[in-house]
Image: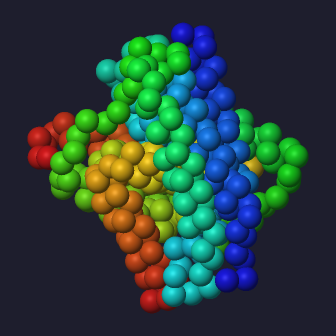
Amino acid sequence: MMKQILAALVSGFILGLGLMVSQMTNPNKVLNFLDVTGQWDPSLLLVLGGAVVTTTLLYRKVFTLATPVLGSQFYLPETTVIDRALIFGALFFGVGWGIIGYCPGPALASLGVRFYDPLIVIVAMIFGMMGYRFLSRKTTVK
Amino acid sequence: MENFTPYSALFGGILIGLGASLFMLLNGRIAGISGLLKGLLSYSTTAVDKSWRAAFIIGLVLSGLVYQAFVPTQGAAIENTSPIILIIGGLLVGFGTAMGSGCTSGHGVCGLSRFSLRSLVATVIFLSSGIATVYVLRHLI
């Protein structure tokens, strides 16, 4: 239990360092990456590429184990349907990302860098998540 | 492409991959930040579950603090720092990631690395809507 908590802390710390080093935490850089018709900055393509290649290779090794080192099973998403929630959710997320240049991880990692902007974003983000939960309970539309 | 920073981008990307892989190796969990946060806010999550979710998020916040202490950079805020804009964007990011079950880390990094079709679809869509949004805000308005 304590080990799992420590493992989560260290994993989050390393992932966060990656966000800092790659400047994913700089919203201007993110917006310049999304600005393909303007002064396009392709750096983030390398961030995503580097992360995906590393994770793909290491996941392969990890999944040869029967269980994770500190747990009884791997928890992987079981849904495979491409439903409306996935499509519209991703669409809304992208619009928000394009407006502010922050996605959830970088917003949290930036708290210690420039406090106020990320804080506003994180609080709004939490309200957005709760808003969705509220709506999805009221309507059972999938 | 004057701001292109290929080496730090690649190195940072590899670190992101290491963190995500370590989390799977040790805890058997997907390192999706929006999912971790959503679980933390959920009533149905147990206290045990909440504690490691919180620990991961604390690790993220600490990484920024520590990195900033050694490499004081990235002072620049975004161009339109108006709190209203930040709130609108933040609400959309939260609502969208909750609805679409993931963000850049969960779908973009972990999902693609598991060859998940759902994550591929989500990543293509949020990159496209992000690009379209920046196009509208920077070049049309």
Q: Position of residue B124 (x, y in %)?
A: 36, 65
Q: Position of residue A29 (x, y in %)?
A: 64, 69
Q: Position of residue B32 (x, y in %)?
A: 46, 41
- In this picture the colour scheme is rainbow
Q: Is residue A49 above or below residue A39?
A: above
Q: Residue at 57% of width from left, 48% of height from top? A: A54
Q: Quadrant of residue A6?
A: top right
Q: Nearer the viewer, residue A124 or B109?
A: B109
Q: Quadrant of the N terminus of chain B?
A: bottom right
Residue B92 as seen in the image, left or right of residue B70: left
Q: Is residue A11 above or below residue A45?
A: above
Depth check, front residue: B49 or A66 = A66
Q: How many marks?
A: 0
In the picture provided, is A122 more to the left or to the right than A18? left
Q: Nearer the viewer, residue B12 or A109?
A: B12
Q: Which residue reaches farthest top?
A: A1
Q: Residue furthest left?
A: A140
Nearest the viewer among B51 and B4 is: B4
